[in-house]
Image (cartoon, rainbow, N blue to C red):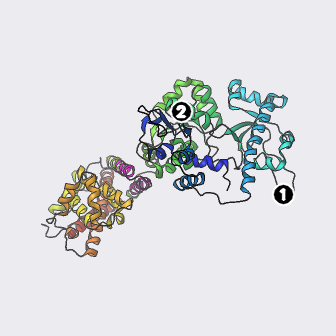
């Protein structure tokens, strides 16, 4: 069985070395690295270091050195293929099946690096030749200095269909096609892919050229042309300048994502070397994961126009399922109509650093994007906003982070829409009409959009006794405004347990709650026999109890939106009375009455 260098590189990239070594060795954080007493020789002072970014360990005492595979073979004592299989299983990768042609493919892949290196050198020479005069003028106009042309290996592809093919003929047409340098079409002679373009080499994390980006001179489409996917290059997993930015990132403690090659080069010239760029597409999950290996909160710095804002939002949505404590994204928006080159040209590196110093957190971007997406004039508009925010929060895989987003969105929503005066505190525009809402003593306590403690306790008792209802009512349950901190925390714990799939029955909930310090609260709730609600009684019919519990949660969740809608309708009538507004007001009053009556019906022996 032959494993290609690309496959092994991907296996190493997907393996977090500190987590692997930390399974059997006690390691501690030391800046950007981890350290420990070396497991290969006896020592009292730690001299063994693990570097996740570079993917290797090293002992300064005994010189033990290696990567994840070497760790499995040297420290764990596994045969090479057993080590590969165990790492691949943990990384979610399939070990390539035995193939007699695998060795040939691996040999071809290795030779493709030689092809790409030769192509980069030829493009570089072409830039300095007669045919590269226009390209040199363009780079000079863009302010790209010669030292950075050399540093980034920038070159030029002459406007010809065969000059590259002729210059690299020693490698053969097949390899040039496989490397993405030639285009092969049926019944036609293969020809050069890149013609009349400034050529920017794309390198892998080891600094090897694996692809190119070509920028057209003057007008024409496409403006940028990238290499196709090849055995060396997968644009969805590659970030431009990652090889250089990783080194700079270790010094700054950050990683910046900009839109394109020229943005990266402009920032590097200004002394900001920790920038990378995607390759003509939106950030992928694989690229975001690689960014997180360099910094906990990468900063995305996109243009302030509509396209840049959409690109930032797409990246935010792709990151949501993978968020974790202290692991997120932030967004620094450039002034509209400016790119990083403009910012540093006009204000110097300090102007760019100022933008990067106060980026917008991910939660703020999501909130702002949804609030500004559509007008929020009607109850349906506001219900749509709440649903979209809830959907974003529910997309988060980590239970604690998901709970925090749900709580944050709920708090912001309530602050935005419940700040209006209560409809009961305002006089109606029509003096002939004064709406009355007959409330019982208990249902009156839930006015104002919040959930009174008696209702909150009853709902939680019902959920503890009928845990299957947590997922059934999850959307409505997450929207309840429970003011008591302990009861609210219990609600979030129950939701997390349900989403994590660890909840089987009521007994399984007790240790989960106890571990969160809520054991006494749960015990008191489970012993609450005095709550006069059908779904809290121990001997209640299970099917009826679950039905009533669901009705209560839905009714309570609907109240804040109905209260806000009635307040808005009343305010509009106060400014201008008309029949349609009056009808809407009456409809909302009746809807609120229905919600209150449903809650009252679920309370047994309630005083009227």
Q: Which mark is residue 120?
A: none
**Mark nearer the viewer, 1 or 2:** 2
The residue at 25%/55% (across/down) is 514
- Please report the residue visible at 28 percent of the width from the left and 71 percent of the height from the top: 546
Label 2 CA crowd tier, 10 Å (few <14, some 14–19, many 20+): many
Residue at 23 percent across and 66 percent down: it is 599
Query: Please, what secondary structure does the residue beneath circle 1 have?
Result: loop
Res 533 quadrant in image: bottom left
- Mark sitting earlier along the chain (1/2): 1
Q: Is residue 35 left or right of residue 208?
A: left
Q: Quadrant of the N terminus?
A: bottom right
Name the residue at the left extreme: 607
Q: Camera-side residue: 479 or 208?
A: 208
Q: Residue 50, how many percent across, how many down?
A: 50, 38
Residue 162 in magenta stretch: no
- How many residues crowd mark 1 within 10 Å: few (<14), some (14–19), many (20+)? few
Determine the image quadrant of residue 257: top right
Quick one: quadrant of the C terminus? bottom left
Highlighted magenta segment, given as a residue range = 381-409
- Residue under label 2, please give it: 249
Where does residue 421 sit, x and y in percent of width and height? Answer: 26, 48
Q: Judge left or right: residue 607 versus residue 183.
A: left
Q: Which mark is residue 186?
A: 1
Q: Secondary structure at mark 2?
A: helix
330 horizontally vs 270: left or right:
left
The secondary structure that dominates the magenta segment is helix
Query: Where is residue 364 shown, x and y percent of the image?
Result: 42, 43
For the residues labelled 1 and 2, the Cα–Cα distance comes to 46 Å
Tell me, yes or no, if residue 426 can be seen here: no
């Amino acid at each position: 069985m032959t494993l290609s260098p690309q496959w092994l590189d991907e296996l190493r990239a997907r393996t977090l070395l500190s987590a692997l070594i930390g399974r059997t060795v006690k390691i501690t954080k030391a800046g950007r690295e981890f350290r420990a007493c070396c497991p290969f020789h006896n020592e009292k002072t730690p001299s063994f270091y693990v570097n996740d970014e570079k993917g290797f360990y090293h002992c300064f005492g005994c010189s033990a050195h290696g990567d994840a595979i070497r760790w499995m073979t040297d420290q764990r004592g596994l045969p090479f293929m057993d080590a590969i299989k165990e790492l691949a299983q943990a990384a979610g990768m399939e070990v390539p099946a035995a193939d007699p042609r695998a060795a040939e493919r691996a040999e071809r892949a290795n030779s493709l690096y030689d092809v790409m290196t030769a192509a980069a050198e030829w493009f570089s020479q072409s830039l300095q030749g007669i045919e590269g005069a226009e390209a040199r003028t363009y780079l000079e106009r863009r302010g790209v200095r010669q030292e950075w042309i050399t540093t980034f290996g920038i070159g030029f592809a002459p406007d010809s269909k065969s000059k590259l093919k002729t210059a690299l003929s020693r490698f053969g047409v097949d390899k040039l096609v496989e490397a993405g340098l030639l285009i092969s079409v049926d019944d036609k002679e293969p020809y050069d892919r890149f013609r009349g373009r400034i050529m920017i080499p794309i390198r892998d994390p080891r600094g090897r050229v694996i692809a190119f980006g070509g920028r057209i001179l003057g007008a024409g489409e496409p403006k940028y042309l990238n290499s196709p996917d090849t055995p060396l290059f997968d644009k969805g997993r590659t970030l431009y300048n990652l090889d250089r930015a990783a080194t700079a990132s270790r010094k700054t403690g950050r990683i910046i994502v900009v839109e394109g090659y020229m943005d990266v080069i402009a920032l590097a010239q200004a002394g900001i070397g920790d920038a990378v760029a995607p390759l003509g597409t939106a950030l992928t999950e694989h690229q975001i994961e690689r960014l997180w290996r360099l910094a906990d909160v990468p900063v995305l710095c996109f243009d302030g126009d509509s396209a840049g804002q959409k690109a930032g939002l797409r990246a935010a949505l792709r990151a949501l399922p993978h968020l974790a404590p202290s692991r997120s994204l932030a967004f620094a928006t450039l002034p509209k109509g400016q790119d990083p080159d403009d910012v540093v040209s006009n204000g110097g590196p300090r102007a760019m650093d100022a933008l990067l110093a106060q980026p917008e957190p991910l939660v703020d971007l999501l909130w702002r994007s949804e609030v500004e997406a559509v007008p929020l004039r009607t109850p349906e508009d506001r219900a749509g906003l709440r649903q979209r925010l809830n959907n974003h929060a529910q997309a988060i895989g980590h239970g604690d982070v998901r709970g925090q987003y749900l709580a944050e969105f709920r708090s912001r929503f309530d602050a935005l829409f419940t700040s209006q005066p209560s409809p009961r505190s305002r006089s109606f525009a029509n003096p002939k009409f004064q709406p009355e809402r007959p409330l019982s003593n208990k249902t009156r306590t839930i006015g104002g959009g919040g959930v009174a403690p008696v209702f909150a306790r009853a709902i939680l008792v019902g959920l503890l006794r009928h845990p299957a209802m947590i997922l059934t009512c999850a959307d409505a349950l997450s929207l309840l405004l429970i003011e008591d901190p302990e009861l609210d925390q219990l609600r979030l714990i129950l939701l997390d347990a349900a989403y994590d799939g660890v909840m089987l029955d009521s007994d399984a909930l007790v240790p989960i709650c106890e571990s969160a310090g809520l054991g006494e609260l749960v015990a008191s709730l489970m012993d609450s026999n005095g709550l006069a609600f059908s779904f809290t009684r121990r001997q209640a019919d299970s099917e009826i109890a679950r039905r009533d519990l669901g009705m209560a949660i839905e009714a309570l969740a609907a109240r804040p939106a109905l209260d806000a809608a009635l307040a808005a309708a009343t305010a509009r009538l106060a400014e201008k009375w008309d029949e349609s507004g009056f009808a809407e007001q009456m409809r909302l009053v009746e809807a609120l009455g229905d919600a209150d009556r449903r809650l009252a019906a679920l309370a047994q022996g309630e005083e009227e």
